[in-house]
Amino acid sequence: MIILPAIDLKGGRCVRLRQGLADDVTVYSDDPVDMAKHWVDEGGEYLHVVDLDGAFGGKPVHLDVIEKIAAAIPIPVEVGGGLRTDDDIRRVVEAGAARAIIGTRAFSDTDSLAETVKLFGAHIAVGIDARDGHVQVKGWVETTDMLAVDLARRADSMGVQTLIVTDTATDGMMVGTNVAAMDEICKAVSCNVIASGGVTTPNDVRDLKALNHDNLYGAIVGKALYEKTTTLRDMKAA
């Protein structure tokens, strides 16, 4: 299990949102590339980047920043936010992303998901954002009737190798992660799962680790690192 520090991009800056709300934003850096280098210096093994403007607008906005980040650091980068077409995915991969994360599209066009996986293979990850167990889409502004675990099973059956599961109720709230939800998803699929949302302390990491799922590949940490309530090294040690 690895810890993935997160960089959320909005207006060219490194920010964090509370529960994904676009109007509840805190700016942490005007230079995302320097922030990426910082997380490498702190021991980061994989970087998680979200194009928030892309997520809300439905198409990538920060490809230039993503390209600069990928070129500046020696660790792989996964990128999500507004990737609604194969061309969007291709552009992100060509910009240097090791994984392109699709969310809304995986829900709204599941019939094409298998073909997309054939085209991009391990470069594809599916992001499942959920509140109270139900999938949220379009930058978390719409809650659907589909259960997150059902979408996870469908993606797994179509050959997706990595799921990124975010509990949106806890994201950015620093209240701990939804361990039960991660347990349910890991039990339901054979592919790798990355936990996201509310991972705040080393104890949260220990709680996830204690689930003893071989396919729980990692956990994404954001606000707790930026608020300096913990360190990347302490999270990795846990």
Image (spheres, rainbow, N blue to C red):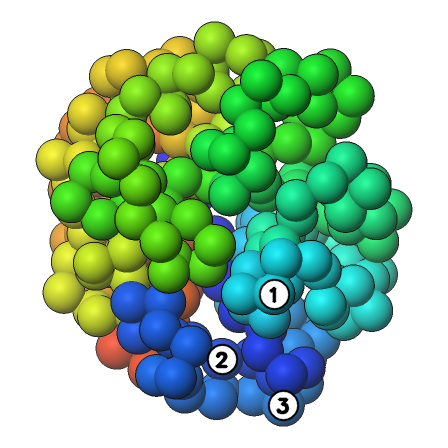
Using residue 74 as the reference point, say whether residue 180 is left or right of it: left
Q: Which label number is shown at residue 17?
A: none
For the residues labelled 1 and 3, the Cα–Cα distance comes to: 21 Å
For the residues labelled 2 and 3, the Cα–Cα distance comes to: 9 Å
Instruction: Please state which amino acid type lies under the numbered disc 3.
Output: Asp
> Residue 61, relative to residue 137: is it above or below?
below
**Residue 217 location, x and y as percent?**
42, 32
For the residues labelled 1 and 2, the Cα–Cα distance comes to: 17 Å
Instruction: Please state which amino acid type lies under the numbered disc 2.
Output: Val
Q: Nearer the viewer, mark 1 or mark 2?
A: 1
Residue underneath mark 1:
57
Quarter of the image for residue 234 reads bottom left
> Residue 173, relative to residue 228: is it above or below?
above
> Residue 154, relative to residue 25: is it above or below?
above
Q: Residue furthest right?
A: 94
Label 3 sits on a secondary structure element that is loop
Q: Which label number is shown at residue 15?
A: 2
